[in-house]
Image (cartoon, rainbow, N blue to C red):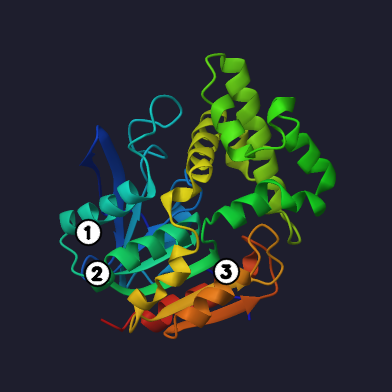
Amino acid sequence: MSREPYPPVEPYRHGLLDVGDGQRIYWECSGNPDGKPAVVLHGGPGGGSRPGHRQWFDPERYRIVLLDQRGCGRSTPSAATGDLSANTTAHLVADLERLREHLGINRWLVCGGSWGSTLGLAYAQAHPARVSELVLLSLVGSTRREIEWITREMGRVFPAEWARFRDGVPEAEREGNLSDAYRRLLADPDPAVRERAARDWCAWEDTHVATYPDHRPYPMFQDPAFRMVFARLVTHYWAHGAWLAEDALVRNADRLARTPGVLIHGRLDISSPAEFAWRLSRAWPDAELVLVGDGHSGPGLLAPLLEATDRFAGRR
């Protein structure tokens, strides 16, 4: 059954939080200041928060917290240039705790999609007492196996597009780690090399999520500044396996015992096959797996997402 998102709302409070390492993260609150706290973790890494994320929650019942993770969106400094050594999964987890404390929140519902599901799981497993529920969609574990699927093995599904993606790196590097090869190109001193690498990376990103009817190219990929930030952060994280031990998020699922979760995933998600979501649900008995006939970011994910946030709205 289809559902419409909640009406648009504007933030009633926002700011920049100094989280150390010269980093300031943008945050905002909307909805009911006395409502149930919920934080939304955007995808990417580097995708940034969007106004539509506020519409996943009943604004009368939720205090909706959005943020832009380090280096992207309205957070500073931009990841378009410079050193990224202080931008890792552990840093982002610590930033969430600083933000929670800054906002005076005891526990919050954690909601995230795609990369945001990886970050949400990593945060919840590190700080389970601070998470009331998890609502995750288009799940990924950011494992090396998944990264290899997206950057190489998926060429079996999109052969022509993948060949163009592969050929974007020097011939000598085409059999190696493509994320790392692009990461190096995106740090090249020649701005033309960096811009071409960002274009090639984002063109491939827009290919492997385009598996549902009426998909339209992601408009932000037409913005050179956004492309550079997004490509630099994704390749930085993927080249390092997101600094997570392989399969750690499934192996550590016991840390989420007694934490309710809803895992929403598309059966037709080629970008992120349903295997990870299924394995996680098997290791986490308090999670419900909802499979829908859609792709990575298709409209079929919205109705179960809204049903989950509605169900948890009255739970403290």
Q: Residue at x 66, y 65 (%)?
A: 273
251 with respect to 184 (left or right)? left
Q: Which mark is residue 130?
A: 2
Q: Residue at x 49, y 55 (%)?
A: 115
Q: Is residue 208 visible?
A: yes
Which secondary structure, mark 3? helix
Q: Quadrant of residue 185?
A: top right
Q: Quadrant of the C terminus?
A: bottom left
**In terms of depth relative to the viewer, which is nearer, 128 or 216?**
128
Q: Residue at x 23, y 57 (%)?
A: 97
Q: Position of residue 121 (x, y in %)?
A: 40, 65
**In terms of depth relative to the viewer, which is nearer, 39 or 261?**
261
228 with respect to 74 (left or right)? right
Say whether disc 1 or disc 2 marks the residue closer to the N-terminus.
Answer: 1
Q: Which mark is residue 276?
A: 3
Say whether disc 2 or disc 3 marks the residue closer to the N-terminus.
Answer: 2
Q: Amino acid at mark 2?
A: Arg
Q: Residue at x 50, y 49 (%)?
A: 241
Residue occupied by mark 1 = 100
Q: How far separated are the C-alphas under marks 1 and 2?
A: 9 Å
**In terms of depth relative to the viewer, which is nearer, 44 or 312?**
44
250 with respect to 256 (left or right)? right
Q: Position of residue 38 (x, y in %)?
A: 32, 67
Which secondary structure, mark 1? helix
Determine contact: label 1, label 2, CB under 8 Å: yes
Q: Quadrant of residue 311?
A: bottom left
